[in-house]
Amino acid sequence: MWVMSRASSNAATRISSFVLMIIFLVLALSLTALILATTVFGPGKEVVAGYLLLIGFLGVALSTYVLFQTRRRILRLRIVAPSITTTIECKKCSFKSVREFQRGDYIFKEVEPCQKCSDKMLITAISREVKEKERVPP
Amino acid sequence: MIAVMASLQNQIAQEPLGEYSWILTVIFYAFFFIFMFYGQRIQMYVMIREVEGSLYKLKYMKDEGRKIAIETIKEIGKPQTDPTGRVDRFLEYFTISPQSLDPAGVVWKLEHILDVRDVRFKDEVKLMAPSADETQINNLENTLEVASTLNFIYKVIRHFYLLGKKTLSLYVIMQIQMILPLIMREAEAYASALKAFSYGQPIGDGAGALVAAKIMHGYEIRKVPKDNVVASVPIEGRTVYVIKAEGPGGNVGKPGDAVKTIVDENEGKISTIIMIDAAMKLEGEEVGEVAEGIGAAIGGPGVDQFKIEESILKYHIPINAVIIKEDIGDNVSPMRKEIFDGVDKAIERIKQVILERTKEGDKVIIVGVGNSIGIGQ
């Protein structure tokens, strides 16, 4: 029911300068480690270069991830009305029809006559279907 | 990361080409001192950011609630003047619960306060929407109450957020951050309920009322206090009094008064009372699952549960409960198909209880508890 949509909002785009400073500091240090790794790389220094590469990549990945997480706050919410269906039944001939909910519908309301036998039809159900995404627990 | 850097620093220091080792030493000490002195503060900032993110969502929900309420009032009520001011005033209404230092008689005091509140709300809605009929007034009242709840949730979270920022106390911000996921679930459920209430759609809470409506449909109905209806239905040779809140407007009635009326009318000669209500499921349980038990199945402030328990105690009437399980989000949002299917299972279970616990010629009361929005009779 809650859907993220892209939209700009002044309030939502405010990101703390402190957080940004830390992110960019980590990014800068990680890049330094990567540059250092290329300088140090040579015979017998593979381990050191490997460590620096590891730190560099980890730092770049971490800071980029945190930066994207912070940017996600820019996304704004909107309420999407779920699809509600109204089931109408004829008591006499059991003819059934399903349509979208209309304002004023309620369960046991008498509506338009039956298409088959022209008898009165009743709203017998108003419901929404939800597709479960979760796995069934053990 | 600090451990890796420390070992790396030692290795580089031992290397003949370790002229860059000072950079790593600086990084190591910087990390060490930052986390030693500012670790808790960093943790607090992370928490504040988390609460802030949720606060934006809550603000959006609150604004949306207000907007939907105003739009619905304008559309249905056709007021002569702009209802915005009145709606804003309504959203700030509060109710003070009675003093319980001396608990004797507190139920009646609470009931009186709730009655006054109910009358006040209805009068306000009538003033806001003069063209609305009784059903629409009930639905509008429910819509405004949802908007008011969202407004309240937003204000409480904002209070703790600002207090946390002001005092920079980890414990102030931590207590709200810990319960935030549950509060957000509840707020999202209320936000989903806005459209349901404004359109008059049946909600998950109405499962009990729907059970009663299905049993009583087609039989003669009369009104009983307060805002309830009752029908006498013959089931397996027994006389069954089926009670529900009057629909299809958003209304929960006072089942406690209705039960007392029917019990008194029959001078206490009731074999059993069966109450049906929607109940919160535990995680892992299926939506629409039906369970059976003993006791007065009714939520709310407790006044009606108290009255029902008083009535059954007076005449020693056994009481059974049938519940239809649902999620907190399903309770106030449009009724799910699984809950609708659960209603038929509950009816079967009720018939089984009647057959097992009573004999032919007995009198039984069935109470369908819940909001009758979108459910006729």
Image (cartoon, rainbow, N blue to C red):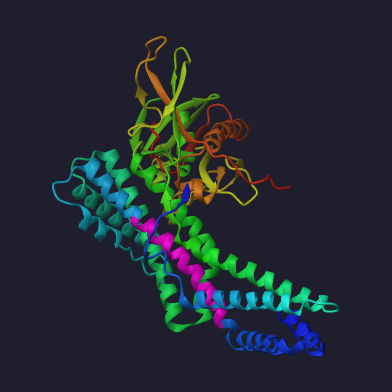
Identify which residue is drawn at 73% across, 89% down. Answer: B19
Tell me the quarter of the image containing the N terminus of chain B: bottom right
Q: What residue lies at 78% left-to-right and 89% top-to-bottom?
A: B13
Q: Give above or below for B45 relative to B185.
A: below
B312 and A31: which is toward the camera: A31
**Along the horizontal axis of the image, is A137 left or right of B272?**
right
Image location of residue A126, percent across then percent down: 44, 32
Q: Nearer the viewer, residue B203 or B100?
A: B203
- Residue found at x 22% / y 55%: B84
**Residue A55 position within the rendered picture, expressed as x and y whole percent measured from the top left:** 71, 74
| Residue B277 vertical placement versus B211 (above, below) | below
Q: Quick check: can you spot residue B15?
A: yes
**Residue most toward the right?**
A44
By secondary structure, the bulk of the magenta-drawn segment is best described as: helix
Point out the residue furthest to the left here. Answer: B80
In this view of the protein, can residue B251 be seen by the observer? no
Extent of the magenta region? B41-63
**Disc count in the image?**
0
Closer to us: B346 or B64: B64
Q: Quadrant of residue B103?
A: bottom left
Residue A79 at x, y percent in the picture: 41, 48
In the displayed structure, B330 sits above or below B114; it is: above
A112 w.r.t. B222: above or below: above
